[in-house]
Amino acid sequence: MKDRSFKIVAVVALVMALSGLVVAYAAYSTTLKVSGTVTAKSSKQSWNVQFQNLSSGTKTGLASVKTAPSLSATQISGFEIEFFAPGDSIEYTWDVTNAGKLDAKLTTASIGSLSCAAAPNSKVTPEEVTALCKDLTMSLTYGDNSEITTNAVLPFASDNTKQLKLKVTWNAASTATISDDVTVTVGESTFIYTQN
């Protein structure tokens, strides 16, 4: 029996010792937590490549502006120019600006072209239309007359603006004459910028 009571005392002592370790361990524990929120902002605040600062146009010769172009952040359109003689031209400049928070790369540049057709109710001949159209030119370049090339980066921080220039000219040496009005359409040019 003495042996048994010794075992009971030993087991009770062992249980108490373990209980003491658990209490001692619990006294030295700390709970650490991490929490918070992330707000996804609209892409308008991080991505904002746009047209700005459209010029009023520079005319040469007898050219006149019938309707000035309209400017929005993503489009320039609606201009109507009248040419009267060889040597007439119109030139517009504007900026492409990266007003966002990410670098932008020009991945696609599709430059339009001129097309000519008899104006509504015009009696101009097809030969006159063709002759005139051969003597008209259109260029769309950077403001310094260099070619617009893809993969050009428009950074968001500094140097974030590129000037573009559109020029339509009736060759001064042209001998084309027209008996009635010709509509000259400036084909759409498209620029696609993507995140760099």
Image: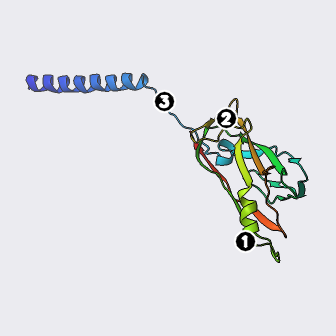
Q: In this view, does 7 lie above or below 177?
A: above
Whole-number angstrom distance, CA of label 1 to CA of label 2: 49 Å
The amino acid pointed to by label 2 is: Phe
Whole-number angstrom distance, CA of label 3 to CA of label 2: 39 Å
Checking the image for residue 32, the label placed there is 3
The residue at which mark 2 appears reads as 156
Q: Which of marks 1 and 3 is nearer the N terminus?
A: 3
The amino acid pointed to by label 1 is: Pro
Q: Which of marks 3 and 2 is nearer the N terminus?
A: 3
- The answer to whether residue 116 of the structure is visible from this angle is no
Foreground disc of the pair 1, 2: 1
The spot of residue 59 in percent (x, y) is 88, 48
Residue nearest the observer in this picture, 83 or 69:
83
In the picture, measured across the screen, residue 9 lies left or right of residue 21, that is: left
Residue nearest the observer in this picture, 173 or 10:
173
Query: In percent of the image, x 50 and y 33: which residue is there?
Result: 33
Query: Which residue is farthest front?
Result: 175
The spot of residue 98 in percent (x, y) is 69, 39
Q: How crowded is mark 2: few (under 14 residues within 10 Å), some or many (20 or more)?
A: many
The residue at which mark 1 appears reads as 126
Residue nearest the observer in this picture, 101 or 53:
53
Whole-number angstrom distance, CA of label 1 to CA of label 3: 84 Å
Q: In this view, does 80 lie above or below 91?
A: below
The N terminus lies in quadrant: top left
The amino acid pointed to by label 3 is: Leu
